Image (tube, grey):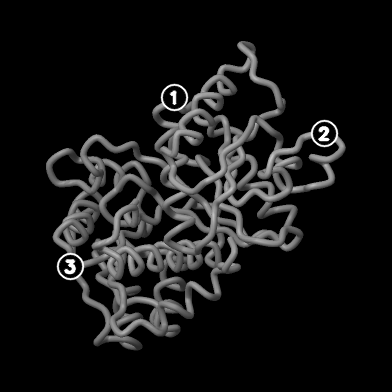
């Protein structure tokens, strides 16, 4: 990204906003969620609506004792009710972001995907976009889909590319370079995903994704390392310059996500797209730091969308 967007800058923008983003948290009761909420309050990132079940009472009391005026506590009898109430708070516009607490992801997603009372945009594809700051790479990377769609169809790939490009534009500026990743640089019937990639390239050339450069298939190293592209004779403007990586399936995306955090010291964040508001559904294995960064990114997106509500292409 030409503006060198990073998580620290996102947080700074939120701290300087005249009004804070409000986050609805579904069934918070674990230590990581408590840490994220407390830190977000202390750093002026957001205010909160905590929809608690009985097991979350002590957590809510501790947060209220420190930041009482900036949180609102609502009660639910169980996780299902907490999920439904949290979604309703966001759907009504009272809160700008939905965050998963200690409940199972499938419980929250059932409420999010409810056709009458949920948050999924009618006709939209639900997908997951992640962001990563990797010490060895010069800029933030967006990538998808590491959590939701097992094996994307052409139309699902199309939605994934649109979400990533839109997120790039919301958080930064410039022309996004999108790498369609695979283990080969050739389009082949042996690898059906590469046929989908050919269609995505065609749509990109027709301007379907606006000012964006889309190319592939290419491997991740070629996408992010110019020397590798030179050695292979790949002259694409995306080679060595990727802002966005599109993975062929959930196995590849999820493996990349876990690998860069464990072995490359990456700082990561993720959120759901295709909904009327950003949704943070962190993995149980994610660190408190990663969950905090996910919330920062979701709040930054919500803030930017609110500020640019009249501009086309500024929603996910």
User: Which residue shows up at 77% across the image and 35% down it?
Assistant: 234
Query: Are the residues flagged by discs 1 and 2 in contact, CB closer than 8 Å?
Result: no
Rendering coords of residue 314 (x, y %): 34, 57
Query: Mark 3 sits on what residue?
Result: 94
Decide: is 289 above or below 118: below
Decide: is 7 above or below 313: below
Query: Mark 1 sits on what residue?
Result: 153
Foreground of the two, 311 or 9: 311
User: Which residue shows up at 46% across the image and 31% down it?
Assistant: 203
Rendering coords of residue 34 (x, y %): 41, 71
Taking the image as shown, residue 204 lies to the left or right of residue 182, namely left
Which of label 3 and label 2 is nearer to you?
Answer: 2
SS for tag 3?
A: loop
Q: Residue furthest top?
A: 189
- For marks 3 and 2, the one nearer the N-term is 3
Query: Mark 2 sits on what residue?
Result: 233
- For marks 1 and 2, the one nearer the N-term is 1
- Distance between mark 3 and mark 2 Cα atoms: 53 Å
């Amino acid at each position: 990204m030409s503006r060198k967007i990073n998580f620290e800058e996102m947080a700074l923008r939120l701290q300087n906003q005249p009004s804070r983003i409000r986050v609805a948290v579904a069934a918070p009761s674990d230590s990581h969620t408590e840490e994220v909420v407390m830190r977000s309050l202390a750093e002026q990132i957001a205010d909160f609506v905590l929809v608690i079940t009985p097991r979350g009472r002590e957590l809510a009391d501790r947060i209220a004792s420190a930041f009482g005026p900036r949180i609102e506590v609502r009660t639910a009898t169980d996780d299902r009710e907490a999920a439904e109430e949290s979604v309703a708070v966001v759907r009504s516009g009272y809160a700008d972001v939905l965050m998963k607490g200690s409940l199972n992801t499938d419980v929250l997603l059932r409420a999010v995907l409810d056709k009458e009372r949920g948050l999924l945009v009618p006709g939209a594809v639900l997908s997951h976009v992640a962001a990563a700051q990797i010490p060895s790479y010069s800029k933030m990377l967006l990538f998808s889909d590491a959590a939701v769609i097992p094996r994307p169809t052409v139309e699902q790939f199309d939605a994934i590319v649109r979400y990533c490009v839109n997120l790039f534009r919301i958080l930064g500026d410039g022309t996004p370079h999108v790498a369609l990743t695979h283990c080969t640089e050739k389009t082949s019937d042996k690898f059906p995903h590469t046929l989908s990639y050919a269609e995505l390239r065609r749509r990109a050339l027709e301007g379907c994704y606006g000012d964006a450069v889309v190319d592939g298939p290419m491997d991740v190293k070629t996408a992010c390392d110019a020397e590798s592209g030179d050695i292979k004779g790949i002259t694409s403007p995306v080679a060595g310059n990727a802002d966005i990586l599109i993975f062929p399936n959930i196995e590849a995306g999820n493996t990349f996500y876990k690998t860069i955090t464990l072995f490359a010291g990456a700082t990561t964040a993720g959120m759901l797209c295709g909904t009327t508001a950003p949704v943070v559904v962190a993995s149980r294995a994610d660190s408190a730091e990663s969950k905090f960064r996910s919330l920062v990114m979701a709040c930054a997106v919500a803030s930017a969308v609110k500020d640019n509500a009249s501009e086309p292409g500024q929603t996910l």
